Image (cartoon, rainbow, N blue to C red):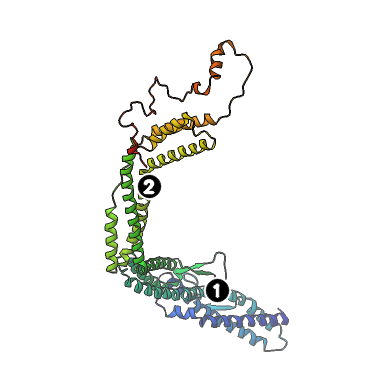
Amino acid sequence: MDRDDVDRALTRLGAEHEAVETSLLALQDHAGRRLLEGAALSGVTRERWAAADAAITRLWAYFDAYSGALAAARAIRERRRWPNREDLAELTERLRGPGVTIAGAGLEGAALAERFSLAELVARMNELYASSLDLVVAADAVWSALPARIDLLAAELHRTRSLAHSVGVRPGEHPSGDDLESITAELTRLRERVIADPLAFWTPAAGSSAPGGGRPDTARYDRAARALDDVRREVEAVLTVRQDAEQRLIAVRDVLSRADRTLAEARNARIEVLAKIAASEVPAVSGPPTALQEQLAAAAEYRRHARWHRLSPLLDALEERAEEELRRARESLTAVTAPLAVRAELRGRLDAYRAKVARHGLAEDPLLIERYDTARRMLWSAPCDLRAAELAVLRYQRATAEALAPPEPATDAAPAPGEHHDAQAHHLPEQHRPDPYRPDPTRSDPYRSDQHQPEQHRPAGPGKEDA
């Protein structure tokens, strides 16, 4: 090395010395390092901090050796303004050669002394500094993030527990009370573990070589926070029950009362159907649900004794079952009154066709009058045979359709030999024309009122007409 090379090397090494000194002093004053020195550590943090603490001690030893070697080189350079050959050779050896010997700096199992060049010593110090700073920053990040959050969650847990006790949510009496106890124990264990072993809650960033690259692992804290949220919602639900329990109980009683009235209406309707409709299978109607009434009485008792945690699930179940009971009562009423609805539909259809006949001026047609009277007697008699009445209404509809159909056009063509009888029948007067729907006097007609009918199908007289 010539004089200029020596001066440039000394300037560079001096700048590196200053940078290393600044970094070491910052590491010495780092809050995380001070916490690590004073904490009762355990687990992986105790193991890693023991190694890092030894590395920091070696780092200061390396720095002292580096400072001594740099000072010796500067002293040689300052002997002369223009160093001679021997000075340049000695400076070259000190600045580039492995001239720094450090006793006891070797790792366990290695030599008791190591020799470094100044450049190798700087690289080694940078390596030890980076690993030590990574551990200190990781521990400090965990301590800065988790204990404060755990304390805030513990304060929220205390408020939730007080609120839960006020509404009867206690351990052994309500599942949420047991959950509060388990969350309390978990937060206590978590905080102790975080303080003693912060590195157990550190997740390094993948592919990052910068000191402190990573983030605190908050999985256990997050689980405890979610569990507390669930308990808080449960307690709030119980509080809501306490506030509107009376209104909800009144609403349940109202729904059950409507269901009872609907069932009573269905029972009365069943009696009416059995009296007015013949040969009809009418479903039975059940009585009022006594179990729901007992549960409603238990709910009122819970409210009277402020047992809100027991009232909350019972009220939810009561509201659901009361609505189901009302729906079942309405379905029962619909099923029971179905025959009456069929009879009403047949009556309406019969009257509609009669009005249509009247509009077309055929109200005095004997056949239509007879079939209308037959159908009406069946529909307005009690008990009413719905199947026979429906057939009678259909016969009236067919007769109406034929009466309202346009006449066929006349033809002058001679009838075929086998059609003479039919042609004569076609030209018979209206009163002598055969009607497939007109009753034959020689045959019995189940829809004729003057024929003998079985007792259960005989239409009622004027005194038995069903309105």
| 10 Å crowding of disc 2: few (<14), some (14-19), many (20+) | some
Which residue ends up furthest to the top in the rendered image?
A: 417
Amino acid carrying label 2: it is Glu
Quarter holding the C terminus? top left
Note whether residue 63 is visible: yes
Check disc 2 and report the residue beneath it: 331
Check disc 1 and report the residue beneath it: 130
Viewer-proximal residue among 230 and 341? 341
Quarter holding the N terminus? bottom right
Image coordinates of residue 362 in percent, x first then y, are 52, 33
Point 49% across, 37% down: residue: 353
- Quadrant housing residue 295: bottom left
- SS state under label 2: helix
Amino acid carrying label 1: it is Ala
Of marks 2 and 1, the one in the foreground: 2
Q: Is residue 90 left or right of residue 31?
A: right
Image coordinates of residue 218 in percent, x first then y, are 46, 68
- Quadrant housing residue 346: top left
Note whether residue 41 is visible: no
Viewer-proximal residue among 185 and 257? 257
Viewer-proximal residue among 384 and 179? 384
Viewer-proximal residue among 54 and 238? 238
Point 41% across, 36% down: residue: 376
Give how far apart the Cα atoms at labels 2 and 1 are: 79 Å
- SS state under label 1: helix
Point 33% across, 45% down: residue: 269
- 267 up-or-down from 303: above or below: above
